[in-house]
Image: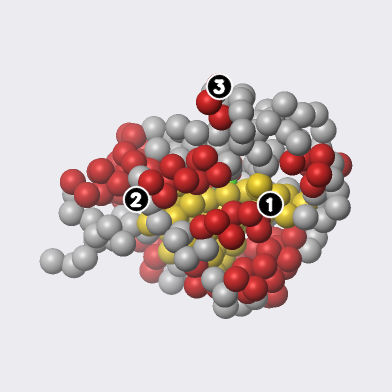
Amino acid sequence: MSVKRLTNIAHRGASAYAPENTLAAFDLALDMGVNDIELDVHFTKDNYIVVIHDDTVERTTNGVGYVSGLTLAQLKKLDAGSWFGKGFSEQRISTLTDVLDRYWGQLNFHIEIKARSVPGLASKTCDMVRNYGIENNVVITSFWKQWVEEAKSHAPEIKTGWLVPLGPGSPWNDSLVDEAVEAKFNQLCPRAELITPTLVNKIQNRGLEVRCHGVFNEDLMRKAVKCGVDGMTINFPDKLRDYLSENDYLID
Ligand code: G3P
Ligand code: CA
């Protein structure tokens, strides 16, 4: 019997249970025995790389404004946890350095270049990864193909994944597989609702890993596992961990 493996990636940390993209959410993922976390990065006004999902701070902090319009000092003053629950008021927006310093050697990082207009962010992220010597523990991802290409051309030794298709509800198109192969990306990352065993095979047969996203419930989680994906981001990695273990997957 062949060994079954699947990468269980805590999406924005264990974000079903703690405020997304905070140290609380990443700590919790680690406590759950997860080896991989996903996080989103942006540039601040003063060119630091910070870990936050949206272009603006309103949804996940008590502040106002664009991340790219605020300095790191301004961003660090914000409460990034109370929106999620009372016990999280000490959570702050982290820099990428904060996260790599804390989890280096313990976790693998799936870093998403989130914004559309951020030339240089992918390269600077790769440089930071090189400084930590964790090139083998990182995948750079984005919905924006140009940032995945920037990472691939700047640091070909670091794995890349392209999140597809762009836009919620947008349909699948097989030409995405051709484009990813041609660009020499390592992973294609389709939305979970679109995958089928045939599509997973088609992508894997072209030499790409299939790492899906948008796994919003346990039915989608089980479907993705059964379709044979190589990995997925998920807000409740404890449930995936248990399901994999019940189904004889190897826990790395
Ligand atoms: O795994 C990719 C996923 O994080 C992409 O969507 O919006 O959650 O960043 P989003
Ligand atoms: Ca993300």
Q: What x and y, as percent, mark residue 56?
A: 76, 35
Q: What x and y, as percent, mark residue 228?
A: 31, 55
Q: Is residue 70 visible?
A: yes
Q: Earlier in the sequence, mark 2 or mark 3?
A: 2
Q: How many residues crowd around disc 3 within 10 Å: few (fewer than 14), some, or many (20 or more)?
A: few
**228, above or below 183, in the image:** above
For the residues labelled 2 and 1, the Cα–Cα distance comes to: 23 Å
Q: Which residue is mark 1?
A: 95
Residue that appears at 50% across and 33% down = 18
**Label 3 amino acid?**
Lys
**Label 2 amino acid?**
Gly
Q: Which mark is residue 194?
A: none
For the residues labelled 3 and 1, the Cα–Cα distance comes to: 23 Å
Q: How many residues crowd around disc 1 within 10 Å: few (fewer than 14), some, or many (20 or more)?
A: many
- Where does the C terminus fall, quadrant-wise? bottom left
Q: Which residue is mark 3?
A: 86
Where is residue 142, by image quadrant? Answer: bottom right
Q: Which residue is mark 2?
A: 33
Name the outermost residue toward the top.
Answer: 86
Nearest the viewer among 186 and 57 is: 57
Residue that appears at 66% across and 47% down = 94
- Say what secondary structure mark 2 lies in: loop
- Say what secondary structure mark 1 lies in: strand
In the shown orientation, is residue 102 left or right of residue 216?
right
Q: Earlier in the sequence, mark 2 or mark 1?
A: 2
- Say what secondary structure mark 3 lies in: helix
Q: What x and y, as percent, mark residue 1?
A: 13, 66
**Label 1 amino acid?**
Thr
Where is residue 65, by image quadrant? Answer: top right
Residue that appears at 66% across and 39% down = 92
